[in-house]
Image: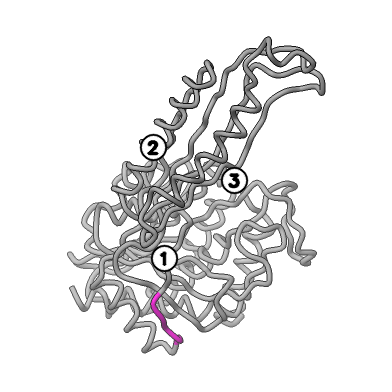
Amino acid sequence: MSFENQLIDWRRELHQNPELSLQEVATTARIRDWLQSAAITLLPYDLKTGAVAEVGQGDKVVALRADIDALPIEEATGLAYRSGNPGVMHACGHDIHTSVILGAALLLKAREAELPGRVRILFQPAEENFGGAKTLIRAGALEGISAIFGMHNEPGMPVGSFATRGGAFYANVDRFAIKVQGKGAHAARPHEGQDAILLASQLVSALQSVASREVNTLDSVVLSVTRIQGGNTWNVLPENVELEGTLRTHRTEVQERVRTRVSEIAAGFARAFNASIEVTWYAGPTALVNDPEWAAFATRVADDAGYQTSTAALHMGGEDFAVYLQQIPGAFVSIGSESRFGLHHPGFNPDERLIAPAARYFAALAEKALQHL
């Protein structure tokens, strides 16, 4: 079987058998079997899911990372190799990422004697719930590494295209939950209660002014209320309403200001309406900040590999590769996957032609990075 077909076969097997974050038991077993069949050394880290391998010898070490988990989405692609796990789908392309880095591992293994150091290969669980990177770090998987590289497929870019940028790339991710407590009443006698639905709806509108009127227009910020829930019948004003949403920024100063203003506005509304409003923040990954030198280096290697390269625009999505970059320098890159439907869509269908060239790229990037150190 050709190199390209082998990687596509692996990708399709992963796609048919997706598993959610921290449930990637069968996925991990497959990855370990494929690595062992190629005589690639598996490192004995204490991981329930996920795997770490290594190729080469010497003191210099760089790392490649792939994420392996799927999403709770019912697939609607109609593909012959569509998900066989109802309600779970590789709708973000982590099956693509895994097959790419598996291919890079095979290529590096074939050149193991010539490598001027070691390449550690991380198959990370639980990217979608933003916990997997910390799990690998706690296990010790970053020890001794001088630089780390990773990718995300980009459905809005054509196959054969490549983009990255130095500095901030992906956004800070915060989730917030707001509990509004008023006073219930009969819908025909609203004056006897404090209308939590009216308060919540006005609060949603007011929060939009934070991003549009209180943050410099040159700073990137998204503040979205994505869930509102209250009441259970048509003729009762409910006592409680819950809101939930997300904040995305690229600068800590902006993040902190917006969070402060959301809490201040909520407190002001609570006083005005004689109600109670509780705001809780849940921190996701911080902004992903590429090392400028390694981002430029990764782009030069991509040029040499024949990619059409460009400077990536700021991305408002979150990515827990950011956690690695807080520990060691490196670069995260986008590689075109040209899908009609975007990430996290039930019809997402990336073009598999990207896989083998990307595997060759990451093998070359790792080897040249070792030479550069």
| Figure quadrant of the N terminus | bottom right
| Residue appearing at x 41%, y 70% in the figure | 333
Measured along the vertical axis of the image, is residue 267 above or below residue 214?
A: above
Amino acid at pointer 2: Arg
Sequence-first disc among 2 and 1: 2
How far is disc 2 from disc 1 in space, using C-alphas?
Answer: 24 Å
Q: Residues within 10 Å of mark 2 (few under 14, many from 20)?
A: some
Q: Is residue 131 above or below residue 324?
A: above
At x 40%, y 52%, the residue is 249
Work out whether residue 113 can be spotted: no
- Provide the residue designation for mark 3: 20
How far is the residue under mark 1 from the one under mark 3? 28 Å
- Which element carries disc 2, helix, strand or loop? helix
Q: How many labels does the image show?
A: 3
Residue 80 relative to residue 343: left or right: right
Residues shaded magenta: 307-311
Q: What residue type is labelled 1?
A: Leu
Which SS does the magenta portion mostly show?
A: strand
Say which quadrant the C terminus sits in. bottom left
- Secondary structure found at label 3: loop
Asked if residue 189 can be seen in this view, the reply is yes
Label annotation for residue 314: 1
Instruction: Judge whether 59 appears above or below 251 on screen.
Output: below
Relative image position of residue 261 (x, y in whole percent): 39, 37
Camera-near label (1 vs 3) is 1
- Give the number of the mark in front: 2 or 1: 2
Of badges 3 and 2, the one in the foreground is 2
| Residue identifier under label 2 | 261
| Above or below, 136 relative to 154 | above
Image quarter for residue 121?
bottom left
